[in-house]
Image: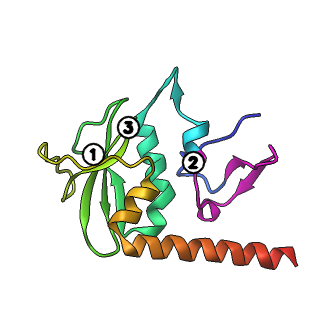
Amino acid sequence: MTAQCGLEASTSRKSTTSEEGMEIDCQPEESIVSSFDEDCVELGDVKDMRLEAEAVVNDVLFAVTEMHVSQSLNSASDVAYINVETREGNRYCLELTEAGLRVVGYAFDQVDEDLSNQYHETVYSLLDTLSPGYREAFGNALLQRLERLKQNGR
């Protein structure tokens, strides 16, 4: 069985694998938690961080004001940079590596080598610490999804 990744930004559907092992289609806006990390972009044993960064952006764009992979900073197979503006208007430059995500600057396309912020395993964890607005948007999306499931279950 092959699962497709959330990388197809130009397409309107993606496949995910349910807990029962069935492949199901869902709209991107219905996807709350990505299975990207488990399923995709393996180059041998090394992930391509540029592609991973695009998937990170696609997963949480609904809950932030702006988010994109940096075009100014050099990304590589082992590191990528993501610019994010929270709903509170704070801007950050994030570094994505195998170790996880961390804030490396407090403006778009800015890397401050003197910062030694901790790594977060997921973008959800990192944004949860940076943005109450993200937390609220994520919670609301989850509640809406649960409501749809409840209504469909009647």
Against 103, is 113 above or below? Answer: above
| Other-residue count near label 1 (Cα within 10 Å), few / some / many at <14 / 14–19 / ≥20 | few
Disc 1 to disc 3: CB gap under 8 Å: no
Q: Residue furthest right?
A: 154
Q: Which mark is residue 71?
A: 1
On the image, the x and y values in percent for residue 57 come to 43, 54
Q: Position of residue 31 (x, y in %)?
A: 62, 60
Rendered-image quadrant of the N terminus: top right
Relative depth, front residue between 40 and 100:
100
Residue at 61%, 59% in the rendered image: 28
Residue behind mark 3: 99
Q: On screen, 79 above or below 90?
A: above
Instruction: Identify the secondary structure beneath mark 1.
Output: loop
Name the quarter where the C terminus is drawn.
bottom right
Q: Which residues are magenta?
A: 14-35
Determine which of the numbered discs, if any, sits on residue 6 in the image: 2
Percent position (x, y) of residue 148? 73, 75
Q: As drawn, which residue projects farthest toward the top?
A: 44
Helix, strand or loop at label 2? It is loop
Task: Look at the picture and state if 77 lies above or below 53.
Answer: above
User: What whole-number distance in Å separates the C-alpha atoms at marks 3 and 2?
Assistant: 21 Å
